[in-house]
Amino acid sequence: MDNLEKRKVETSTVCPLCKSEKESMNHLFRLCEISKRVWKASQLGIISTNPTFLSCREWVTNFVSYCLQDLEKNSVRLTMFVAVLWAIWSHRNDIVFRYMSTDPTSVMTAVHIYVARWLKATDLVSIHIGERQIESDKSRPMLLWRLG
Ligand SMILES: [Zn+2]
């Protein structure tokens, strides 16, 4: 039984994001084509191609554990990782409960907002991820990631 079913989260049999595969945690967060586009745009270097190698829980645990080994170096990566997971989940719920349309760009916008709030809360001005910069100051425009 999938974790979503165990937690009594109502699921249709079809993923709300792509509407073409069965919904599961592994699919929603890792294998869905929409989620893959978001991960690619996040520039975290996450490419999900092997669904049977690790469970979704192991995958998350491994990434978090990796970041915690050198938190000072990886705190931004960890923040971005959690922000992407949360944004995907929130978007899934917006589609299911608010009848919104699938929009990977809005997922990345949400990620930017979450990370910008974190930057503001931790008194950081901006971060660079790959070639992109995210700023906490709302008066300056944030660069949007391109979704491939
Ligand atoms: Zn999907």
Image (cartoon, rainbow, N blue to C red):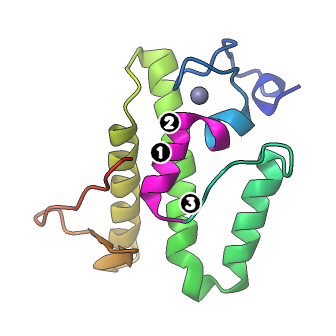
**Is 3 in front, or is 46?**
46
User: In terms of sequence position, does the residue under pointer 2 or pointer 3 come before the other?
Assistant: 2
Rendered location of residue 80, percent (x, y):
50, 63
Residue under circle 3? 81
Q: Amino acid at mark 2?
A: Ile
Ligand 1 found in image quarter: top right
Residue sitting at x 19%, y 69%: 137
In this view, the mark in front (2 or 3): 2
Quarter of the image that includes the N terminus: top right
Q: Residue furthest right?
A: 1
Disc 2 CB within 8 Å of nearest ligand 1 atom: yes
Q: Is residue 56 left or right of residue 83?
A: right
Tag 1 residue: 37
Question: Spatial distance from mark 2 to mark 3, Cα to Cα?
Answer: 16 Å
CA distance for labels 3 and 1: 14 Å
Which contiguous range is marked in magenta?
30-44
User: Which residue appears at 40% of the width and 76% of the height?
Assistant: 122
Q: Are marks 2 and 1 in contact (CB under 8 Å)?
A: yes
